Image (tube, helix red, strand yellow):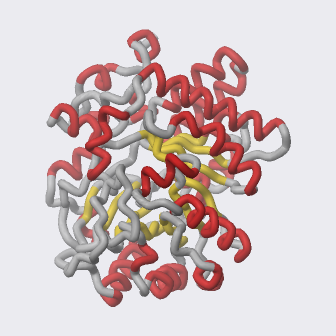
Amino acid sequence: MIGISKLYCGTVEPSDALRYGRHSGSLPSHLLQFSIDKKPVVVWNMTRRCNLTCIHCYAHAKTMADSDELSTAEGKALIDDLAAFGAPVILFSGGEPLMREDLPELAEYAVSKGMRAVISTNGTLITSEMAKTLKAIGLSYVGISMDGMEEIHDRFRGQKGAFQASLDGIRNCQAAGIKVGLRFTMNNINVNDIPAVFKLLEDMNVPRICFYHLVYAGRGSKLVEEDLSHARTREVVNMIMDETKRLHDIGKPKEVLTVDNHADGPLVYLRLLKEDPERAREVLELLQMNEGNSSGHGIGCVSWNGDVHADQFWRHKSFGNVRQRPFSQIWTNPEDPLLLQLKEKKKHVGGRCATCRWLDICAGNFRVRAEALTDDVWAEDPACYLTAEEIAKP
């Protein structure tokens, strides 16, 4: 993640991460990427079932549950292991996690074990009563997918009325006192709606939004032709900076992040180098703490059937299954050489990534995207939009 608000607008200073000691167990959620121990945030795609049919779903979600989903008891065993391991956050995802009736029970169990529990949801199933339940169990955050305004969003979701249902979910979370934010996956179909989405944040007083770069996985692999060009990506990230600054300057600051393209970090730095060189030096320090893409290191994923992946986009590659071996053992004593390599990916990347001046900051960007287009996990990330001049070592 690249914290646009904290980097470009200075909402969090480098000393904040240092003041917390940079250990994941003590860091607040918005500073976890600066931890030195890098205990993984774990995404548990607890079900493949979903009530919608989103055109970019990385999980190939479907209407019926898989018969091999981890049971409630197995889910609690997973949480026991993650808590003992020191994973600071468990993110319940899907499919649609609220399709599982035991989500509140499992989230409450995670909280009781000292973990921060968050969910990634389409928001349509968050009734007033469900929001109150989620608040009562101590859920830390609800991320609701919102991929455009009404026409575009409903098109993405494959269901008319999904947009209004998601807005109801947001309102219900707010009424219950749960922190809620938006998740937006950028592509040519919806990118023109970004200014309107910022207006929605402002009007509804939503405090946080994550803008995801498209990853070519699941049904999203069919949207490669709709991915933004390098030039357009640069324009959009700059627009996101502009909109973030506008809200900051009028006294309505929002936490704004971009996800899944670590080229955004150097872009913020290079822009600030022209606008505010002193601030740029502080931003460079934060980016160096961040250490770039952390798939297989600072983030991990467990599928509905217990398979362990480097992140939620690596479903084609499992490193083991928690039914046979605990996540903590799979993660710290890998039997698969690829997982070992991902933990030190800067040694293995090729192409222009290998000689890039930002390698220590980016860590070679997103390996799944490189593999999807080249069949080579270690090829350069095709979504990196930085120019040859910008990546050349001084």
Residue 333 screen position, x and y as percent: 22, 62
Q: In this view, does 346 lie to the left or right of 114?
A: left
Residue drawn at x 46%, y 66% as measured from the top left: 91
Task: Find residue 79 and report its image quarter.
Answer: bottom left
What is the total number of numbered labels drawn onto the structure image? Answer: 0
Residue 209 screen position, x and y as percent: 60, 50
Name the residue nearer the viewer: 153 or 207: 153
Name the residue nearer the viewer: 73 or 297: 73
Is 294 placed above or below 59 here? above
Residue 382: in sight, yes or no?
Answer: yes
Residue drawn at x 30%, y 36% as measured from the top left: 224
Residue lying furthest front:
160
Residue 185 screen position, x and y as percent: 46, 45
Residue lying furthest right:
251
Name the residue nearer the viewer: 159 or 253: 159
Name the residue nearer the viewer: 228 or 34: 228
Residue drawn at x 41%, y 78% as measured from the top left: 99
Residue 148 screen position, x and y as percent: 54, 46
Residue 34: in sight, yes or no?
Answer: no
Task: Find residue 137 and report its image quarter.
Answer: bottom right
Task: Find residue 6 and report its image quarter.
Answer: top right
Is 138 placed above or below 365 here? below
Q: Is residue 206 left or right of residue 115?
A: right
Residue drawn at x 54%, y 71% as measured from the top left: 116
